[in-house]
Image (spheres, grey):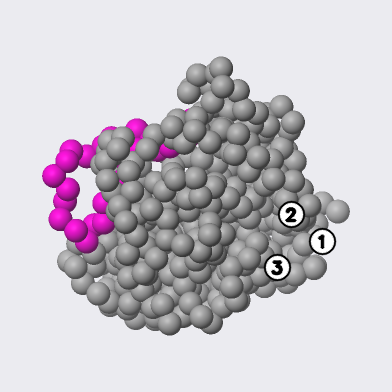
Amino acid sequence: MRLLLALSALLLPLFAQAWGNHTPMCYRAFERMPEVAGAAPVKAEPLADFLHDQEAAIARTLDAQEAWARQHLQHHAPRPEALRFVPDARRSDAERRAAFIAALRLAPSSRLALYLQPDPREAAPARPSLEAAVVTVVRPAAGSTQRFVALQPGEAVAPLAVLASACDEPDYGHDLNLFDDNPGHPDYGFGKQPFGNPAVAIGSQAPFHMGFFHQGAIFNALAPNFARTFTEMRVQQYGGLAVLAWQTGHAYWGWRFAGMALHHVEDLTQPYHASAAPGATLARMMWVNLKAQLGAPADRQGLVVLQGNRHFVLEQFQTRWIIDAARQRRDGPLELALRDAARDGRYPPWSPAYVREVVAAEAFAAGPATDAAVVVGAPAKFVSDPNLDFAANEARFGPELARDLQGQREALLGQVAELLGHFGAHSRNSLRGLLSQAGGTMPH
């Protein structure tokens, strides 16, 4: 029994982020989509205005979402009744905002500020930059590519910019420390953190950004905690609010909430977020666990380090390419893949099952090929040496990785292009689904 329970702790996800900065990729994925490129500018609006104007409709929407989740999501953690969003015209804007965040079960510190992340392909905006702490509670890491500018209430802004900016937003602290065993947790009813280290804040968001839906019956029996993920819940929450905002004349928040929903869809296009260990068989995982239980944990720890390193190298490679190409206004295979709308029709129409049965299934199947491409495309010391923890030494080894990948990147480039083709297609298909729910017309 100890062996079976230990399997759930085998591969503690070291990175809760899947694709680094989603925003530059979303500019490319949506810039030629007619529903986005042709949409009229919208007026930036503080969240308090939307909440005040549509308080009763928001309450009905959140209640309907909770009822749907309890019926359709197998491992849903029911929302405590005390968190229900109840209209109250007498409360202040701050109180209403806090009640809304609690009803969604987001981190109480979530910013939800008015901001944009400009397209790095465009000239730097004339307006001054915005301090990251205004937008995110997560301290930017070394080499962070996010750059923010402020929006003013009533300012006209392109839907593409709102959407692409919001596609990165759930990584800004929305899902930190929400479980009962996290430091300073709110009483949100999520129970204990199902996997990862509950003492590490950034890791606590992993169950909201990963979905291990296709590991198989044996794995699920041995490691049932891995099935407790809340990605689908977040897609439904944000997506439903986007539809409501579009339908009620709050188009800015329609595009903003849509971007937040798409973030969780896009995370599951990353194989390391849809598979517990793309580079290891179940037999391998069980064997290293058995050895660890018998007093030889080195192989298990090595497997954890290698999976984390490969995830990190893939993310670093993709992020550096996208940002460098954008700044040089260069189109390469990754940019072409992100824009490739011919892929969209290969998949079924959007539905509540799309995230699990289409997006995550495809990413899980791509796991072995992705892991193999990382191994042959990156220097061996970064992806094959279990004694080198790349993430813990990024400042030291990052420049070396960037340099040495230049001569070995083709195998990796091809696989990343394929994955970003999935990223673009699923992002557009999901947005079409939300727009259709809003009435099938382009919101203004």
Q: Position of residue 236 (x, y in %)?
A: 61, 52
In the foreground, 1 or 358: 358
Q: Nearer the viewer, mark 2 or mark 3?
A: 2
Q: Which residues are magenta?
A: 109-137
Q: Position of residue 212 (x, y in %)?
A: 66, 61
User: Disc 1 residue type?
Assistant: Ala
Predominant SS along the magenta part: loop
Q: Would you say residue 313 is visible in this rendering? A: no
Identify the disc placed on residue 215.
Answer: 3
What is the distance, in whole Å, between disc 2 and disc 1 at their CAs? Answer: 18 Å
At 65% from the left and 62% from the top, the residue drawn is 352
Occupied quadrant, residue 368: bottom right
Q: Position of residue 18 (x, y in %)?
A: 48, 58
Crowd tier of the residue under label 2, counting other residues whose Cα lies within 10 Å: few below 14, some 14–19, many 20 or above = few
In the foreground, 108 or 226: 108
The residue beneath circle 1 is: 221
The residue beneath circle 2 is: 73
Q: Would you say residue 424 is visible in this rendering? A: yes
Q: Is residue 125 left or right of residue 359?
A: left
Q: Using the image, determine if residue 314 lies above or below residue 343.
A: above
